[in-house]
Amino acid sequence: MPCERVGHSAVMKNDPENGDCMYIFGGKDEENNKLNDTWKFNFTTLQWTFIECFDEPLARSGHSASIFRDNFMIIYGGIYEVTKELNDMHVFDLANDKWICLFEEINSPKKYGNNDSPTKSANLGHSPILRASTRI
């Protein structure tokens, strides 16, 4: 079961065969540590499952997430550390349990271990809108 957290994202996937599921990513724990874990909750079995992934996005809180075409969770932005906001976009393939980076800032802390803020504008507390005609 995931630890208690705040500032995480959650999306719902409708699945009549296996039961509807909620996926959560990131946030911060009781000690204010940023998280980058991915979990699935099945509403039929009432079971949590940790999804072991490789190449996860940076730990973050305050990011937004949306479900896209019922097969992908898209996360955007958030806070990496105090005064270090993110301006990146990652896609989690729900069918294959795999993270894909769509884009990161040039000076992303993940790429270069850079301690400067990756972006000048905070991308947190926002809501994404996905167009049905957009293709990934």
Image (tube, grey):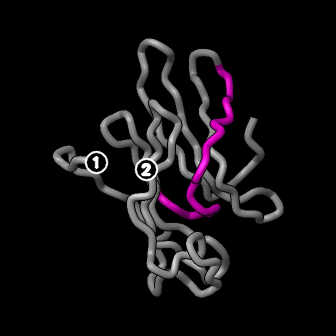
Residue 70 covered by magenta stretch: no
Tag 2: Cα neighbours inside 10 Å, few (<14), some, or many (≥20)?
Answer: many
When the figure is inspected, residue 94 is found, relative to residue 113, above or below; the finding is: above
Provide residue 77's location: percent of width, then percent of height: 48, 67
Provide residue 79's location: percent of width, then percent of height: 58, 71
Q: Do the residues labelled 1 and 2 touch (CB within 8 Å)?
A: yes
Provide residue 92's location: percent of width, then percent of height: 47, 45
Count of numbered labels shown in the rendering:
2
Is residue 31 or residue 96 the one in the foreground? 96
Tag 1: Cα neighbours inside 10 Å, few (<14), some, or many (≥20)?
Answer: few
In the displayed structure, does residue 72 sit left or right of residue 79?
left
Give the residue drawn at x 48%, y 41%.
Answer: 11
**Element under label 2?**
strand
Figure quadrant of the N terminus: top right
**Which amino acid, mark 1?**
Ile
Q: Which of marks 1 and 2 is nearer the N terminus?
A: 2
When the figure is inspected, residue 62 is found, relative to residue 85, above or below; the finding is: above
Q: Name the residue under label 2.
A: 91
What is the distance, in whole Å, between disc 1 and disc 2 at their CAs?
9 Å
Which residues fall within the magenta stretch? 46-64
**Element under label 1?**
loop
Which corner quadrant of the image does residue 42 belong to? top right
**Which amino acid, mark 2?**
Val
Q: Mark 1 points at which residue?
A: 136
When the figure is inspected, residue 54 is found, relative to residue 69, above or below; the finding is: below
Which corner quadrant of the image does residue 104 belong to? bottom left
Residue 52 covered by magenta stretch: yes
Provide residue 105's location: percent of width, then percent of height: 44, 76
Main SS category, magenta section: loop
When the figure is inspected, residue 15 is found, relative to residue 118, above or below; the finding is: above
Give the residue drawn at x 83%, y 62%.
Answer: 31
Give the residue drawn at x 65%, y 54%.
Answer: 36
